[in-house]
Amino acid sequence: MSETAPAHLALVGRAFPGGQYTLEPWRAWLLTDALGDDTGDTQPHPVMAWMAAVGGMGITWDELFAWFDATADDGPMLGEHQTTLHAPLRSGVTYRVSGKVTSVDRKTGRRAGTFDIVGYELYLHDGQEHVATCWNSLVLPRRLAT
């Protein structure tokens, strides 16, 4: 069963404060090593796009949860994720990060209970060039009074 989470629908379209994230070469190397990829490759791993996006979104996870009247104690979970690279990532570049909330949907499951799924996108830009789009969803469990 699905229904709208009316109290939070007004947040669809809300922009993240945004900011910047420098893709430091040492961090790109560490991630590549941790993933077991070729550390001699100078091209940063695509996962760095997500790391840069959340690192420069301009708010903490706790602040994002609070937008939807949730806390870390409620047990929020990462739902889905999709990164689209529009241009290659480059080490040493400082990317501008922006983004917005794209959806809020209330769901109810027989075993899971009531939860909200919040969709949001974060964008990486290098100057005027749109480098990456990271779409994510958060699953926010709700403990509603019956």
Image (cartoon, rainbow, N blue to C red):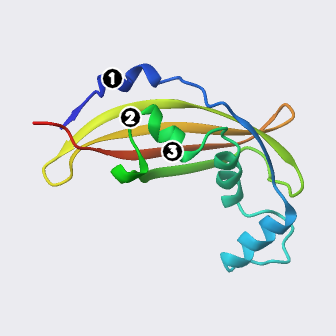
For marks 2 and 1, give the one nearer the viewer. Answer: 2
The x, y position of residue 66, in whole percent, is 45, 36
* For residue 49, side relative to residue 71 (left or right): right
| Callout 1 secondary element | helix
Q: Amino acid at mark 2?
A: Asp
Question: Residue 71 bears which disc, if any?
Answer: none
* Residue drawn at point x = 77 percent, y = 78 percent: 38
Q: Do labels 2 and 1 touch, CB within 8 Å?
A: yes
Whether 44 is drawn above or below 60: the answer is below
* For residue 118, side relative to residue 125 (left or right): left
Specify few, some or many for label 1: CA neighbours under 10 Å numbering under 14, 14-19, or 20 or more: few
Counting residues from the N terminus, which is met first, the one under dot 2 or under dot 3? 3
Whether 112 is drawn above or below 70: the answer is below
Counting residues from the N terminus, which is met first, the one under dot 3 or under dot 1? 1
Q: Amino acid at mark 1?
A: Ala
Per the model, the C-alpha gap separating discs 2 and 3 is 10 Å
* Residue drawn at point x = 81 percent, y = 55 percent: 23
For marks 3 and 1, give the one nearer the viewer. Answer: 3
Provide the residue designation for mark 3: 62
